Amino acid sequence: MGKSPLNRREFLKAGLTGLATTGAAAALLADELKKQKKTDKPADKNKLPEPPGGRQEGFIYRALGKTGIVLPVVCMGVMNTDSYELVRAALDAGLVHLDTAHNYLRGRSEEVIGQVVKGRPRDSFVVATKVPPGDGFNEKLDLSLKRLGLDYLDILYLHNLTKRDIALAPENMAMIEAAKKSGKARFIGVTTHANEPEVIRAAIEAKIYDVVLVGYNFRKDYIKELNAAIEEATSAGLGIIAMKTLAGGFWDKQRTQPINTKAALKWAMNNPNITTAVPGMTTFDQLKSNLEVVKDLKLTEQELQDLKLGQTANLSGLYCQGCQRCLPQCPKSLPIPDMMRAYMYAYGYRNLQAAHEVVTELNLPDNPCGGCDECSVNCAFKFNVRNRLVDINRLKTVPGDFFA
Ligand code: SF4
Ligand code: SF4
Protein backbone atom coordinates (compact mmCIF):
# COMPACT_ATOMS: atom_id res chain seq x y z
CA MET A 1 0.00 0.00 0.00
CA GLY A 2 1.09 3.58 -0.61
CA LYS A 3 1.83 5.93 2.21
CA SER A 4 -0.83 8.33 3.40
CA PRO A 5 -0.90 11.87 2.15
CA LEU A 6 0.74 14.38 4.44
CA ASN A 7 -1.40 15.76 7.19
CA ARG A 8 -1.92 19.50 7.52
CA ARG A 9 1.11 19.95 9.77
CA GLU A 10 3.39 18.19 7.32
CA PHE A 11 1.79 20.03 4.41
CA LEU A 12 2.45 23.37 5.98
CA LYS A 13 5.99 22.48 6.87
CA ALA A 14 6.62 21.37 3.33
CA GLY A 15 4.77 24.29 1.81
CA LEU A 16 6.55 26.92 3.79
CA THR A 17 9.97 25.65 2.96
CA GLY A 18 9.09 26.13 -0.68
CA LEU A 19 8.25 29.78 -0.12
CA ALA A 20 10.53 32.73 -0.11
CA THR A 21 11.83 33.27 3.41
CA THR A 22 9.80 36.35 4.11
CA GLY A 23 7.81 37.75 7.01
CA ALA A 24 4.74 36.71 5.07
CA ALA A 25 5.88 33.10 5.27
CA ALA A 26 6.33 33.35 9.02
CA ALA A 27 2.89 34.91 9.39
CA LEU A 28 1.47 32.11 7.27
CA LEU A 29 2.99 29.52 9.55
CA ALA A 30 1.54 31.19 12.64
CA ASP A 31 -1.89 31.44 11.05
CA GLU A 32 -1.94 27.94 9.77
CA LEU A 33 -0.65 26.37 12.95
CA LYS A 34 -3.75 27.73 14.64
CA LYS A 35 -5.89 25.82 12.20
CA GLN A 36 -4.33 22.50 12.92
CA LYS A 37 -7.07 21.44 15.23
CA LYS A 38 -9.04 20.44 12.16
CA THR A 39 -6.39 18.07 10.92
CA ASP A 40 -6.90 16.84 7.38
CA LYS A 41 -7.74 13.24 7.13
CA PRO A 42 -6.54 11.15 4.23
CA ALA A 43 -9.42 10.24 1.95
CA ASP A 44 -11.30 7.34 3.46
CA LYS A 45 -11.44 4.91 0.61
CA ASN A 46 -14.45 3.14 2.06
CA LYS A 47 -16.46 6.34 1.94
CA LEU A 48 -15.47 7.43 -1.54
CA PRO A 49 -17.39 6.14 -4.53
CA GLU A 50 -15.44 4.01 -6.99
CA PRO A 51 -13.18 6.00 -9.30
CA PRO A 52 -13.75 5.72 -13.05
CA GLY A 53 -12.30 2.46 -14.33
CA GLY A 54 -11.87 1.03 -10.83
CA ARG A 55 -9.44 1.55 -7.99
CA GLN A 56 -5.73 1.02 -8.54
CA GLU A 57 -3.70 -0.57 -5.78
CA GLY A 58 -1.87 2.03 -3.71
CA PHE A 59 -3.26 5.11 -5.49
CA ILE A 60 -4.43 8.04 -3.38
CA TYR A 61 -7.91 9.20 -4.39
CA ARG A 62 -9.92 12.29 -3.64
CA ALA A 63 -13.44 13.45 -4.42
CA LEU A 64 -13.95 16.29 -6.88
CA GLY A 65 -16.21 18.65 -4.96
CA LYS A 66 -19.84 17.71 -5.21
CA THR A 67 -19.57 16.18 -8.65
CA GLY A 68 -19.46 12.61 -7.37
CA ILE A 69 -16.33 12.04 -9.44
CA VAL A 70 -13.40 10.48 -7.60
CA LEU A 71 -9.94 10.87 -9.08
CA PRO A 72 -6.38 9.82 -8.31
CA VAL A 73 -4.28 12.72 -7.02
CA VAL A 74 -2.32 12.80 -10.28
CA CYS A 75 -3.85 12.70 -13.75
CA MET A 76 -2.67 13.81 -17.18
CA GLY A 77 -2.45 17.12 -18.98
CA VAL A 78 -2.41 16.54 -22.73
CA MET A 79 -1.07 19.92 -23.79
CA ASN A 80 2.36 19.12 -25.08
CA THR A 81 2.13 15.66 -26.58
CA ASP A 82 0.32 13.97 -29.43
CA SER A 83 1.64 10.54 -28.54
CA TYR A 84 -1.16 7.97 -28.62
CA GLU A 85 1.09 5.54 -26.78
CA LEU A 86 1.74 7.89 -23.90
CA VAL A 87 -1.89 8.90 -23.44
CA ARG A 88 -2.97 5.26 -23.69
CA ALA A 89 -0.34 4.20 -21.17
CA ALA A 90 -1.43 6.87 -18.69
CA LEU A 91 -5.05 5.84 -19.01
CA ASP A 92 -4.25 2.14 -18.76
CA ALA A 93 -2.18 2.81 -15.65
CA GLY A 94 -5.17 4.45 -13.96
CA LEU A 95 -4.57 8.18 -14.52
CA VAL A 96 -8.13 8.37 -15.70
CA HIS A 97 -8.62 12.08 -16.11
CA LEU A 98 -7.34 13.58 -19.36
CA ASP A 99 -7.20 17.36 -19.53
CA THR A 100 -7.06 19.16 -22.86
CA ALA A 101 -8.24 22.37 -24.51
CA HIS A 102 -9.86 23.34 -27.78
CA ASN A 103 -6.64 25.01 -28.93
CA TYR A 104 -4.00 22.58 -27.67
CA LEU A 105 -1.81 21.49 -30.56
CA ARG A 106 -4.37 23.08 -32.85
CA GLY A 107 -6.91 20.43 -32.02
CA ARG A 108 -4.51 17.51 -32.29
CA SER A 109 -4.59 16.94 -28.53
CA GLU A 110 -8.36 16.38 -28.62
CA GLU A 111 -8.06 14.13 -31.67
CA VAL A 112 -5.45 11.95 -30.01
CA ILE A 113 -7.56 11.63 -26.87
CA GLY A 114 -10.54 10.77 -29.07
CA GLN A 115 -8.65 7.90 -30.66
CA VAL A 116 -7.36 6.60 -27.35
CA VAL A 117 -10.73 6.58 -25.58
CA LYS A 118 -12.58 5.16 -28.58
CA GLY A 119 -14.25 1.89 -27.63
CA ARG A 120 -13.57 2.23 -23.91
CA PRO A 121 -16.52 2.24 -21.51
CA ARG A 122 -17.65 5.85 -21.23
CA ASP A 123 -17.60 5.72 -17.45
CA SER A 124 -13.99 4.52 -17.32
CA PHE A 125 -12.39 7.93 -18.02
CA VAL A 126 -12.98 11.62 -17.39
CA VAL A 127 -12.30 14.10 -20.18
CA ALA A 128 -12.17 17.86 -19.72
CA THR A 129 -11.69 20.48 -22.37
CA LYS A 130 -11.56 24.25 -22.34
CA VAL A 131 -13.15 26.76 -24.67
CA PRO A 132 -12.59 30.50 -24.40
CA PRO A 133 -15.70 32.58 -23.72
CA GLY A 134 -16.91 34.83 -26.49
CA ASP A 135 -17.77 34.59 -30.16
CA GLY A 136 -17.83 31.12 -31.59
CA PHE A 137 -18.07 29.38 -28.23
CA ASN A 138 -20.76 26.92 -29.31
CA GLU A 139 -19.08 26.13 -32.62
CA LYS A 140 -15.79 25.49 -30.86
CA LEU A 141 -17.50 23.30 -28.30
CA ASP A 142 -19.13 21.23 -31.03
CA LEU A 143 -15.83 20.89 -32.86
CA SER A 144 -14.10 19.78 -29.65
CA LEU A 145 -16.75 17.09 -29.10
CA LYS A 146 -16.33 15.96 -32.68
CA ARG A 147 -12.57 15.70 -32.39
CA LEU A 148 -12.90 13.82 -29.13
CA GLY A 149 -15.55 11.53 -30.62
CA LEU A 150 -17.70 12.09 -27.55
CA ASP A 151 -21.36 12.97 -27.06
CA TYR A 152 -20.54 14.83 -23.90
CA LEU A 153 -17.63 16.13 -21.88
CA ASP A 154 -17.19 15.32 -18.24
CA ILE A 155 -15.97 18.84 -17.56
CA LEU A 156 -16.23 21.90 -19.78
CA TYR A 157 -14.26 24.96 -18.74
CA LEU A 158 -14.37 28.59 -19.73
CA HIS A 159 -10.72 28.99 -20.56
CA ASN A 160 -8.14 31.29 -19.05
CA LEU A 161 -10.10 33.76 -16.94
CA THR A 162 -8.19 36.57 -15.26
CA LYS A 163 -10.99 38.75 -13.89
CA ARG A 164 -14.08 38.16 -11.81
CA ASP A 165 -16.23 40.02 -14.34
CA ILE A 166 -15.57 37.39 -16.98
CA ALA A 167 -16.60 34.52 -14.71
CA LEU A 168 -19.73 36.44 -13.72
CA ALA A 169 -20.65 37.91 -17.11
CA PRO A 170 -24.29 36.91 -17.71
CA GLU A 171 -23.62 36.00 -21.34
CA ASN A 172 -20.74 33.71 -20.37
CA MET A 173 -22.72 32.06 -17.62
CA ALA A 174 -25.71 31.58 -19.90
CA MET A 175 -23.53 30.05 -22.59
CA ILE A 176 -21.84 27.48 -20.41
CA GLU A 177 -24.98 26.68 -18.46
CA ALA A 178 -26.75 26.02 -21.74
CA ALA A 179 -24.01 23.57 -22.68
CA LYS A 180 -24.62 21.71 -19.44
CA LYS A 181 -28.39 21.73 -19.81
CA SER A 182 -28.15 20.45 -23.36
CA GLY A 183 -26.15 17.48 -22.12
CA LYS A 184 -22.89 18.43 -23.83
CA ALA A 185 -21.15 18.70 -20.47
CA ARG A 186 -21.81 16.92 -17.21
CA PHE A 187 -20.02 19.58 -15.21
CA ILE A 188 -18.83 23.11 -15.91
CA GLY A 189 -16.05 25.26 -14.58
CA VAL A 190 -13.46 27.93 -15.16
CA THR A 191 -9.69 27.87 -15.57
CA THR A 192 -7.38 30.52 -14.21
CA HIS A 193 -3.66 30.99 -13.97
CA ALA A 194 -3.51 34.69 -13.25
CA ASN A 195 -5.29 36.63 -10.52
CA GLU A 196 -6.60 33.28 -9.34
CA PRO A 197 -8.04 34.20 -5.92
CA GLU A 198 -10.35 36.76 -7.53
CA VAL A 199 -11.49 34.34 -10.22
CA ILE A 200 -12.02 31.51 -7.72
CA ARG A 201 -14.16 33.74 -5.53
CA ALA A 202 -16.17 34.82 -8.56
CA ALA A 203 -16.74 31.17 -9.43
CA ILE A 204 -18.13 30.61 -5.94
CA GLU A 205 -20.33 33.68 -6.24
CA ALA A 206 -21.71 32.61 -9.60
CA LYS A 207 -23.17 29.43 -8.06
CA ILE A 208 -23.27 27.65 -11.41
CA TYR A 209 -19.76 26.26 -11.64
CA ASP A 210 -18.74 22.81 -10.42
CA VAL A 211 -14.95 22.85 -10.88
CA VAL A 212 -12.05 25.31 -10.97
CA LEU A 213 -8.79 24.43 -12.70
CA VAL A 214 -6.18 26.64 -11.11
CA GLY A 215 -2.49 27.39 -11.51
CA TYR A 216 -0.86 26.15 -8.32
CA ASN A 217 2.75 25.52 -7.40
CA PHE A 218 5.51 26.06 -4.88
CA ARG A 219 6.65 29.30 -6.49
CA LYS A 220 3.53 31.37 -5.84
CA ASP A 221 4.40 34.20 -3.48
CA TYR A 222 0.72 34.81 -2.70
CA ILE A 223 0.08 31.21 -1.74
CA LYS A 224 -1.66 32.18 1.49
CA GLU A 225 -4.36 34.11 -0.33
CA LEU A 226 -4.64 31.44 -2.97
CA ASN A 227 -4.99 28.70 -0.37
CA ALA A 228 -7.68 30.71 1.39
CA ALA A 229 -9.67 31.11 -1.84
CA ILE A 230 -9.29 27.41 -2.61
CA GLU A 231 -10.49 26.50 0.85
CA GLU A 232 -13.54 28.74 0.42
CA ALA A 233 -14.27 27.07 -2.90
CA THR A 234 -14.05 23.55 -1.52
CA SER A 235 -16.28 24.56 1.40
CA ALA A 236 -18.79 25.77 -1.17
CA GLY A 237 -18.69 22.37 -2.88
CA LEU A 238 -16.51 23.23 -5.85
CA GLY A 239 -13.92 20.75 -7.02
CA ILE A 240 -10.38 22.06 -7.44
CA ILE A 241 -7.88 20.73 -9.96
CA ALA A 242 -4.31 22.02 -10.16
CA MET A 243 -2.32 22.90 -13.26
CA LYS A 244 1.10 24.53 -13.72
CA THR A 245 2.24 22.41 -10.80
CA LEU A 246 5.71 21.94 -12.31
CA ALA A 247 6.39 25.70 -12.51
CA GLY A 248 7.75 25.56 -16.04
CA GLY A 249 9.95 22.52 -15.57
CA PHE A 250 13.28 24.38 -15.61
CA TRP A 251 15.01 27.14 -13.72
CA ASP A 252 16.81 28.44 -16.79
CA LYS A 253 16.17 29.10 -20.45
CA GLN A 254 19.02 26.80 -21.48
CA ARG A 255 17.35 23.93 -19.60
CA THR A 256 20.55 23.07 -17.79
CA GLN A 257 18.88 23.32 -14.37
CA PRO A 258 15.72 21.23 -14.23
CA ILE A 259 13.19 21.80 -11.48
CA ASN A 260 12.67 18.71 -9.37
CA THR A 261 9.25 18.18 -10.91
CA LYS A 262 8.48 15.15 -8.79
CA ALA A 263 8.96 17.26 -5.69
CA ALA A 264 6.95 20.10 -7.22
CA LEU A 265 4.03 17.80 -7.95
CA LYS A 266 4.10 16.33 -4.47
CA TRP A 267 4.25 19.80 -2.98
CA ALA A 268 1.11 20.87 -4.83
CA MET A 269 -0.86 17.76 -4.00
CA ASN A 270 -0.11 18.04 -0.33
CA ASN A 271 -2.85 20.62 -0.26
CA PRO A 272 -5.78 18.37 0.69
CA ASN A 273 -8.26 20.81 -0.85
CA ILE A 274 -6.98 20.00 -4.33
CA THR A 275 -8.43 16.85 -5.86
CA THR A 276 -5.92 16.15 -8.57
CA ALA A 277 -3.24 17.71 -10.75
CA VAL A 278 -2.93 17.51 -14.52
CA PRO A 279 0.80 17.88 -15.20
CA GLY A 280 1.66 17.90 -18.88
CA MET A 281 3.56 14.76 -19.78
CA THR A 282 5.67 14.19 -22.84
CA THR A 283 7.80 11.18 -21.89
CA PHE A 284 7.39 7.76 -20.35
CA ASP A 285 9.91 8.74 -17.69
CA GLN A 286 7.59 11.50 -16.58
CA LEU A 287 4.69 9.07 -16.53
CA LYS A 288 6.70 6.67 -14.39
CA SER A 289 7.62 9.43 -11.98
CA ASN A 290 4.00 10.60 -11.76
CA LEU A 291 2.85 7.05 -11.09
CA GLU A 292 5.13 7.08 -8.07
CA VAL A 293 3.75 10.40 -6.86
CA VAL A 294 0.15 9.21 -7.13
CA LYS A 295 0.99 6.62 -4.47
CA ASP A 296 3.23 8.64 -2.21
CA LEU A 297 3.06 12.38 -1.60
CA LYS A 298 5.67 12.52 1.13
CA LEU A 299 8.46 14.97 0.37
CA THR A 300 11.99 13.99 1.30
CA GLU A 301 14.45 16.47 2.82
CA GLN A 302 16.36 16.48 -0.44
CA GLU A 303 13.24 17.26 -2.43
CA LEU A 304 12.45 20.15 -0.14
CA GLN A 305 15.96 21.44 -0.63
CA ASP A 306 15.61 21.09 -4.39
CA LEU A 307 12.51 23.26 -4.41
CA LYS A 308 14.52 26.02 -2.77
CA LEU A 309 17.11 26.06 -5.54
CA GLY A 310 15.62 29.21 -7.06
CA GLN A 311 16.30 31.07 -3.85
CA THR A 312 19.67 29.60 -3.03
CA ALA A 313 21.06 29.96 -6.55
CA ASN A 314 19.18 33.18 -7.26
CA LEU A 315 17.39 31.80 -10.31
CA SER A 316 14.24 33.49 -11.51
CA GLY A 317 12.95 30.46 -13.39
CA LEU A 318 10.68 30.37 -16.42
CA TYR A 319 7.34 30.40 -14.66
CA CYS A 320 5.34 33.64 -14.43
CA GLN A 321 2.98 33.43 -11.49
CA GLY A 322 0.39 35.70 -13.13
CA CYS A 323 0.32 38.10 -10.20
CA GLN A 324 -0.12 41.03 -12.61
CA ARG A 325 1.96 43.39 -10.46
CA CYS A 326 3.92 44.33 -13.57
CA LEU A 327 0.91 45.60 -15.47
CA PRO A 328 0.56 49.07 -13.92
CA GLN A 329 4.33 49.53 -14.06
CA CYS A 330 4.57 49.42 -17.85
CA PRO A 331 3.74 52.77 -19.49
CA LYS A 332 2.75 50.94 -22.66
CA SER A 333 0.41 48.58 -20.79
CA LEU A 334 1.96 45.60 -22.51
CA PRO A 335 0.39 42.21 -21.72
CA ILE A 336 3.49 41.10 -19.83
CA PRO A 337 2.07 38.04 -17.99
CA ASP A 338 0.76 36.54 -21.24
CA MET A 339 4.06 37.11 -22.98
CA MET A 340 5.92 35.58 -20.04
CA ARG A 341 3.61 32.56 -20.30
CA ALA A 342 4.50 32.24 -23.97
CA TYR A 343 8.17 32.42 -22.96
CA MET A 344 7.65 29.52 -20.57
CA TYR A 345 5.82 27.49 -23.22
CA ALA A 346 8.75 27.99 -25.59
CA TYR A 347 11.71 27.46 -23.30
CA GLY A 348 10.22 25.37 -20.50
CA TYR A 349 7.74 23.14 -22.33
CA ARG A 350 9.47 23.28 -25.73
CA ASN A 351 5.96 23.82 -27.10
CA LEU A 352 6.63 26.44 -29.74
CA GLN A 353 3.18 26.03 -31.19
CA ALA A 354 1.51 27.10 -27.94
CA ALA A 355 3.97 29.97 -27.56
CA HIS A 356 3.37 31.05 -31.14
CA GLU A 357 -0.37 31.01 -30.65
CA VAL A 358 -0.19 33.31 -27.63
CA VAL A 359 2.25 35.68 -29.32
CA THR A 360 0.32 35.95 -32.58
CA GLU A 361 -2.95 36.46 -30.76
CA LEU A 362 -1.48 39.34 -28.77
CA ASN A 363 0.04 40.73 -31.95
CA LEU A 364 2.36 43.31 -30.40
CA PRO A 365 4.41 45.63 -32.58
CA ASP A 366 7.70 44.24 -33.89
CA ASN A 367 9.58 46.29 -31.34
CA PRO A 368 7.17 46.26 -28.39
CA CYS A 369 9.52 48.13 -26.04
CA GLY A 370 10.66 50.68 -28.61
CA GLY A 371 10.92 54.19 -27.18
CA CYS A 372 11.38 52.95 -23.63
CA ASP A 373 14.91 53.80 -22.54
CA GLU A 374 14.80 51.79 -19.37
CA CYS A 375 12.37 49.12 -18.29
CA SER A 376 10.42 50.37 -15.29
CA VAL A 377 8.99 46.95 -14.47
CA ASN A 378 10.09 45.35 -11.25
CA CYS A 379 8.86 41.78 -11.68
CA ALA A 380 7.98 39.80 -8.56
CA PHE A 381 10.31 37.04 -9.80
CA LYS A 382 13.02 39.43 -10.97
CA PHE A 383 12.53 38.55 -14.62
CA ASN A 384 14.29 40.76 -17.10
CA VAL A 385 10.90 41.50 -18.61
CA ARG A 386 12.15 43.55 -21.51
CA ASN A 387 14.62 40.90 -22.69
CA ARG A 388 12.08 38.11 -22.43
CA LEU A 389 9.37 40.09 -24.12
CA VAL A 390 11.51 41.08 -27.08
CA ASP A 391 12.93 37.57 -27.31
CA ILE A 392 9.61 35.73 -27.44
CA ASN A 393 7.95 38.34 -29.66
CA ARG A 394 10.25 37.19 -32.47
CA LEU A 395 8.02 34.13 -32.84
CA LYS A 396 5.36 36.39 -34.33
CA THR A 397 7.21 36.55 -37.61
CA VAL A 398 7.20 32.76 -38.09
CA PRO A 399 4.29 31.56 -40.25
CA GLY A 400 1.85 29.42 -38.30
CA ASP A 401 2.07 26.49 -40.73
CA PHE A 402 5.56 25.74 -39.44
CA PHE A 403 3.87 24.41 -36.34
CA ALA A 404 1.05 22.50 -38.00
S1 SF4 B 1 5.92 38.98 -15.07
FE1 SF4 B 1 6.51 38.99 -12.92
S2 SF4 B 1 5.25 40.62 -11.97
FE2 SF4 B 1 4.35 40.14 -13.98
S3 SF4 B 1 2.76 38.62 -13.54
FE3 SF4 B 1 4.61 37.49 -14.04
S4 SF4 B 1 5.60 37.11 -12.06
FE4 SF4 B 1 4.07 38.73 -11.72
S1 SF4 C 1 10.78 48.21 -21.54
FE1 SF4 C 1 9.55 47.56 -19.80
S2 SF4 C 1 8.33 49.34 -19.24
FE2 SF4 C 1 9.14 49.71 -21.30
S3 SF4 C 1 7.53 48.96 -22.68
FE3 SF4 C 1 8.94 47.25 -22.36
S4 SF4 C 1 8.06 46.13 -20.65
FE4 SF4 C 1 7.06 48.13 -20.64
Image (cartoon, rainbow, N blue to C red):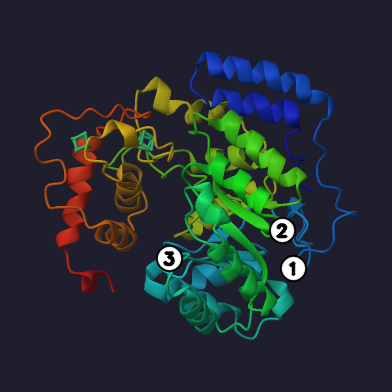
Q: Secondary structure at mark 1?
A: loop
- Separation (CA) of disc 2 from disc 3: 22 Å
Q: What residue appears at the point 74 percent right and 30 percent down from the top-left corner?
A: 8
- Mark 3 sits on what residue? 81
The amino acid beneath tag 3 is: Thr
Relative to 360, residue 384 above or below: above
What quarter of the picture does the C terminus occupy? bottom left
Pointer 2: residues within 10 angstroms few (<14), some, or many (20+)? many
- The outermost residue toward the right is 46
Q: Describe residue 386's horizontal placement relative to residue 159 as left or right.
A: left
Q: Position of residue 75 (x, y in %)?
A: 61, 58
The amino acid beneath tag 1 is: Pro
Relative to 46, residue 69 above or below: below
- Mark 1 sits on what residue? 52
Name the foreground residue: 194 vs 84: 194
On the image, which quarter does residue 232 sit in? top right
Mark 1 and mark 2 residues within 8 Å of each other at the beta carbon: yes
- Separation (CA) of disc 3 from disc 1: 23 Å
Q: Earlier in the sequence, mark 3 or mark 1?
A: 1
Relative to 120, residue 47 above or below: above
Q: Earlier in the sequence, mark 1 or mark 2?
A: 1
Nearer the observer: mark 2 or 3; the answer is: 2
- Mark 2 sits on what residue? 71
On the image, which quarter does residue 223 sit in? top right
Mark 2 and mark 3 residues within 8 Å of each other at the beta carbon: no
Q: Dividing the image into four quarters, tell me where ligand 1 lies.
A: top left
